[in-house]
Image (cartoon, rainbow, N blue to C red):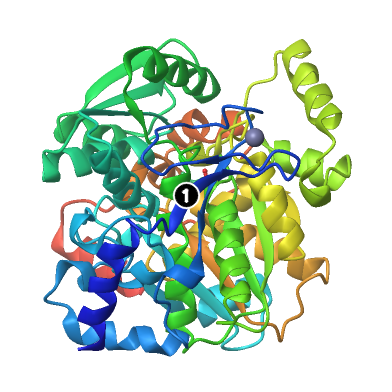
Amino acid sequence: MADTKLARTNSMQLESGVAHQRCINPQCRATLDIAQVRTACDRCGDLLDIEYDWSKTAVPKRLSDFEQMWSQRHLPLRFSGVWRFHELLPFAPADKVVTVGEGQTLLQQSNEVGKYVGMAAEKLYLQYEGMNPSGSFKDNGMCAAFTHARLTGAKRAACASTGNTSASLAMYSSVTRLMKAVIFIGSGKISYGKLSQALDYGALTVQIAGDFDDAMLRVKEVSKDLGIYLVNSINPFRLEGQKTVMLRVLEALRWNVPDWIVVPGGNLGNSSAFGKAFIELKELGLINRVPRLAVINAAGADTLFQLYERRGLRWNNGQPDMAIIGDYYSDLDTRKAKADTIASAIEINRPVNLQKCLRALDFCDGVVRKVTDQEILDAKAQVGAGGIGCEPASAASVAGAKLLREEGVIAPSEQVVCILTGHQLKDPTATVAYHSTDQDQFNDVLGKRGVSRASFANRAIAVPNDLDDIVRAIQLYS
Ligand SMILES: *Cc1c(COP(=O)(O)O)cnc(C)c1O
Ligand SMILES: [Zn+2]
């Protein structure tokens, strides 16, 4: 079979140096062997990329060649929605990759949600990454980071997390038994759905008195001191796995490129990975046009929006104006500003992948918008009512698409894919409060976030425990 031939070529490629790590700063371009464990360039401190010498590896001639992998779902490597695209992320031999069956996701066309956003019929798609084994897109990246960690002989892996990274890390640790998971969370910021996963899967959970940005700084220090493998999206191998979200979108669209990809932005790993995927597909001649990228911040955590749309920060051929970033961060410090949104997965003020995201926005002619918690929760209710449902942060993509439609940036006839990053059950507190008839519960969870309405609430009806009353109520309301 052609596939076995590909797999066999792959295990040999490693010896012939098909992949290496490279600094993203064009003034530096330092390279590093892929066996090394780093989260930044030794020479200049910038982020690292995984770069491939495509001439030394077997890449399918057409994207549709990947369809032959479907007939081999009995092989873990081909069952995985990440590793069936192994030829496009060939940093590890095929027989060494870690998989727990991630990436079995769905691209659903939704006219219900499309109408809410303002699209013409059949133009809006929802990419359900909540269908991953730990319930968020993070599994796409975690299997790649775990693969690299295993190749380097790591015994412990750590992350700072708003919840989903820790759930994913904890799950990969418990299923594979390859490494002990150590997770850092801020106090009071993590939803029970996500925390329950980390605890259940047996991760060592360190709750520090601070927010995500504090936890992120600490975990970097601690992993350096103790030599623990870091799996936050600052890890370039993780982003390799996340490229495949875009490959599956293209696959579901029969390899046609949509007009827009709309994604929530937190630490900006996804948007960065999506940009890298399109850069490589274009370079390889596997696509001939590139979608536009819209990254959506929450209004309470809008660093990218402020920098990109308000202060004109650009990739600028790899030389972004660092003074703009520095000034913005010192202003945050002076004001003691902390990220604050109901969309806890994107409650981040200092996105670690900022520069890579700028590169993605540059390549994909991108835009950045911010949406309020009210807009997020209304969009989330619409996704639930006309789709499979999602957690609050994910709905930022739908709220953002609606805003861009209203502004006329997106035309009704364009094909739009909103990425739903996490499962509906991740954060039931926000959902139940939105639909609640209890004003105190609503205020307690949402009122303090400036959410005043629940326009799409589906409220439970209270009836006495009496057959006639129950029958009457159902007839009245249905
Ligand atoms: C991690 C996460 C995000 C943010 O993604 P980034 O890659 O950090 O921008 C958004 N939504 C959900 C559900 C997440 O878990
Ligand atoms: Zn460098």
Task: Establish whether ligand 2 lies closer than 8 Å to the Cβ of label 1.
Answer: no
Q: Is residue 239 left or right of residue 180?
A: right
The residue sitting at 49% across, 14% down in the picture is 210
Residue under pointer 1: 20
Look at the picture and state if 369 lies above or below 303: below
Residue 146 percent coordinates (x, y): 28, 44
Q: Which quadrant holds residue 206?
A: top left
Looking at this view, is 344 or 91 the one in front? 91
Q: Which quadrant holds residue 312?
A: top right
The residue sitting at 23% across, 41% down in the picture is 150
Look at the picture and state if 93 lies above or below 155: below
Looking at this view, is 293 or 396 the one in front? 293
Considering the numbered disc 1 on the image, is that residue within a helix, a strand or a loop?
A: strand
Residue 121 percent coordinates (x, y): 60, 89
Residue 81 percent coordinates (x, y): 31, 68
Residue 309 visible here: yes
Residue 128 percent coordinates (x, y): 40, 66
Q: Which quadrant holds residue 321?
A: top right
Looking at this view, is 121 or 366 the one in front? 366
Image quadrant of ligand 2 equals top right
Q: Is residue 206 left or right of residue 381?
A: left
Q: Callout 1: few (<14), some (14-19), or many (20+) C-alpha neighbours within 10 Å? A: some
Where's the N terminus, which quadrant? bottom left
Looking at this view, is 179 or 42 the one in front? 42
Residue 266 visible here: no
Where's the C terminus, which quadrant? bottom left
The residue sitting at 26% across, 87% down in the picture is 2
Tell me the amino acid under the disc marked 1: His
Q: Is residue 375 left or right of residue 199?
A: right
Direction front: furthest residue: 16
